[in-house]
Amino acid sequence: RTKQNFPCLLDGCKQVCSSAGDLMRHQQSLRHRPPQYFCSGCEYGFTRPDALKRHLNNKPRCRAAH
């Protein structure tokens, strides 16, 4: 079985992902999109809601501010 590569074609990016899902997640990163989800504790911005949720789970001070 041949391993398939999924190159990012945005903005001359050189990232190559091993799955279509990884490529979609990469293209939602801060490198390619402005943040849409913000922590009200530290005002850090995230491009995906799961990244904000992970941040809040790891930062009790920020979680308390939400």
Image: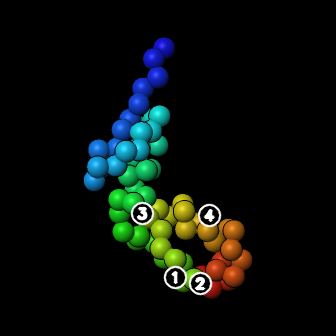
Query: Which disc is residue 41 wearing?
Result: 2
Q: Amino acid at mark 1?
A: Glu
The residue carrying mark 3 is: 30
Nearer-the-camera pick, 49 or 8: 8
Nearest to N terminus: mark 1 or mark 4? 1
Q: Residue 51: where, in percent of width, then height?
A: 54, 62
Q: Residues within 10 Å of mark 1 (few under 14, many from 20)?
A: few
Secondary structure found at label 1:
loop
Residue extending farthest to the right is 60
Taking 57 as reference, is 13 left or right?
left
Q: Which residue is rendered at x = 35% and y = 63% of the image? A: 33
The Cα–Cα distance between marks 2 and 4, rounded to whole angstroms, is: 14 Å
Nearest to N terminus: mark 2 or mark 4? 2
Secondary structure found at label 2:
loop
The Cα–Cα distance between marks 1 and 2, rounded to whole angstroms, is: 6 Å
Q: Nearer the viewer, mark 3 or mark 1?
A: 3
Taking 39 as reference, is 33 left or right?
left
Query: Which disc is residue 54 wearing?
Result: 4
Q: Nearer the viewer, mark 2 or mark 3?
A: 3
Q: Amino acid at mark 3?
A: Leu
Q: Quadrant of residue 6?
A: top left
Q: Which residue is rendered at x = 54% and y = 60% of the image? A: 50
Q: Residue 3: where, in percent of width, then height?
A: 46, 23
The Cα–Cα distance between marks 3 and 1, rounded to whole angstroms, is: 15 Å
Nearer-the-camera pick, 13 or 38: 13
Q: Amino acid at mark 4?
A: Arg
Q: Amino acid at mark 2?
A: Gly
The Cα–Cα distance between marks 2 and 3, rounded to whole angstroms, is: 19 Å
In the depicted structure, whether residue 5 falls above or below residue 33 = above
Nearer-the-camera pick, 21 or 66: 21
The residue carrying mark 1 is: 43
Disc 1 + disc 2, Cβ < 8 Å: yes
